[in-house]
Image (cartoon, rainbow, N blue to C red):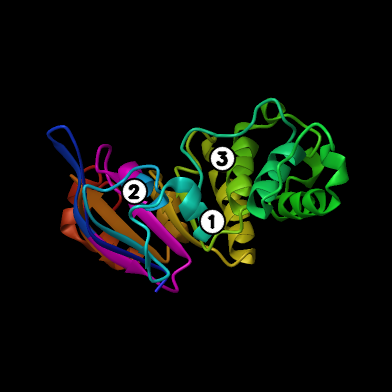
Amino acid sequence: MLLEIKELRKSFGGVRAIDGVSFAIDAERRVFLIGPNGAGKTTLVNLISGYLRPDSGAVIFRGKNVSGLDMRERSRLGIARSFQLVNVFWNLTVEENLAMSVASRKGITLKPFPPLRSHREVLEEAAEVAKAFGLEGSLDMLPTELSQGDRKVLDVAMALALRPRLLLLDEPTSGVATRDKFAIMERILAAVESYGAATIIVEHDMDVVFNYAERVLVLHHGKLIADGDPEKVRSREDVRSVLLGGIYA
């Protein structure tokens, strides 16, 4: 089993953000996590990635209880993530951003001397990741020079450069123009799957979800209310009610 979540709970003051959530992931590649605002989606991703620690329950990754490990330690074991807000080095080029992730995974510290150019294997791998995501023509550009969609792609590419077994994506199409969402998702999923990683994707756009999901998890008030095949989940009355009164039926 790749990931097991067992009776996970997390509260902030008097608000229980995650309330006894349990599920397991094995062979599925495209697991989408959905729910209304405030359902606990990002909190759950934070708990899985190690950005937050649970109040109780367990995160089991590849048979190991990682609940007490921080984000860096979980990353070494094979869990990586992207954030809803693009989290890149704005003063570095696309190539340098990707190289930072590759070097981090390899345990290489990049310093002014010796310069990045002396780490040929790091640059070669950074170029491979860029090509997988369609960024090979943007290696010398700064993130500020990219479109919003390509910034999102770069953020995901940096996470994938860590070579995770499990990649957590928080709203990968947020802020992307409607006309570009499917193209961006196609690029991301094709690249991720070429590296053999499984994904848990937080997504608010139901057209994207039900076009690409292999499995859908639905959170509401911190509880997992549905889990399974996308069409069966979408047909449930309680899910339709939660997701804006049936607009996605």
The residue that appears at 45% across and 74% down in the rendered structure is: 27
Residue span colored magenta: 22-43
Element at badge 1? helix
Element at badge 2? helix
Label drawn at residue 76: 1
Specify whether residue 78 is in view: no
Q: Position of residue 151 (x, y in %)?
A: 62, 36
Of callouts 2 and 3, the N-terminal one: 2
What's the amino acid at mark 2? Leu
Of callouts 3 and 1, the N-terminal one: 1
Specify whether residue 130 is in view: yes
What's the amino acid at mark 1? Arg
The residue that appears at 51% across and 38% down in the rendered structure is: 178
| Disc 2 from disc 3: Cα separation | 32 Å
What's the amino acid at mark 3? Arg
Question: Which quadrant holds residue 58?
Answer: bottom left
Question: Which quadrant holds residue 137?
Answer: top right
Looking at the image, which residue sits at the far left? 14
| Disc 1 from disc 2: Cα separation | 16 Å
Q: Position of residue 172 (x, y in %)?
A: 50, 44
* In this picture, residue 157 sits left or right of residue 24: right
Q: Which residue is mark 2?
A: 47
The residue that appears at 47% across and 37% down in the rendered structure is: 174
| Disc 3 from disc 1: Cα separation | 36 Å
Label drawn at residue 179: 3
